[in-house]
Image (tube, rainbow, N blue to C red):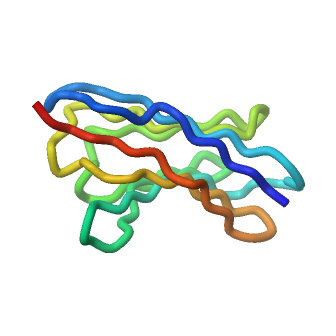
Amino acid sequence: QVQLVESGGGLVQPGGSLRLSCAASGSIFSINVMGWYRQAPGKDREFVARITRAGGIYYGDSVKGRFTISRDNAKNTVYLQMNSLKPEDTAVYYCNVVSSASYWGNGTLVTVSS
């Protein structure tokens, strides 16, 4: 059993920044990929960013240049630094971890509004 605990969501004004964290615990042998997805109201879940254990990094087109993903392998934690936030970034952000299986967090709400 793997548990993912996300934190860092909240309300921010357009142009502002937030940092999300996701800590994995439990029966983890070796985490390969850690990443973030998001789902806005009425829309499908969208890929945001992912980072492999070796450090390979990939971003969704809508967040390139504004979001930065990083991870601490010793702490089994992944971070998402979000800058220059826009109202269209409003969504529930989900952490995803891939080891022997794929695991999802419960999500953390990010609201970008003035």
Residue at screen point 71% across, 57% down: 32
Q: Is residue 32 left or right of residue 22?
A: right
Quarter of the figure that contains the C terminus: top left
Q: Is residue 77 left or right of residue 28?
A: left
Q: Is residue 56 left or right of residue 17?
A: right
Point out residue 94 in the picture as x, y percentages from the top left corner.
Answer: 49, 54
Residue at screen point 68% across, 39% down: 23
Residue at screen point 75% across, 51% down: 3
Point out residue 33 in the picture as x, y percentages from the top left corner.
Answer: 64, 57
Q: Is residue 108 left or right of residue 31?
A: left
Is 93 placed above or below 15 here?
below
Residue at screen point 50% across, 52% down: 107
As rendered, which of 54 and 104 lies closer to the eye? 104
As rendered, which of 7 and 59 lies closer to the eye? 7
Point out residue 93 in the picture as x, y percentages from the top left corner.
Answer: 43, 51
Is 113 placed above or below 40 here?
above
Point out residue 68 in the picture as x, y percentages from the top left corner.
Answer: 40, 37
Is 51 placed above or below 44 here?
above
Residue 17 location, quadrant: top left
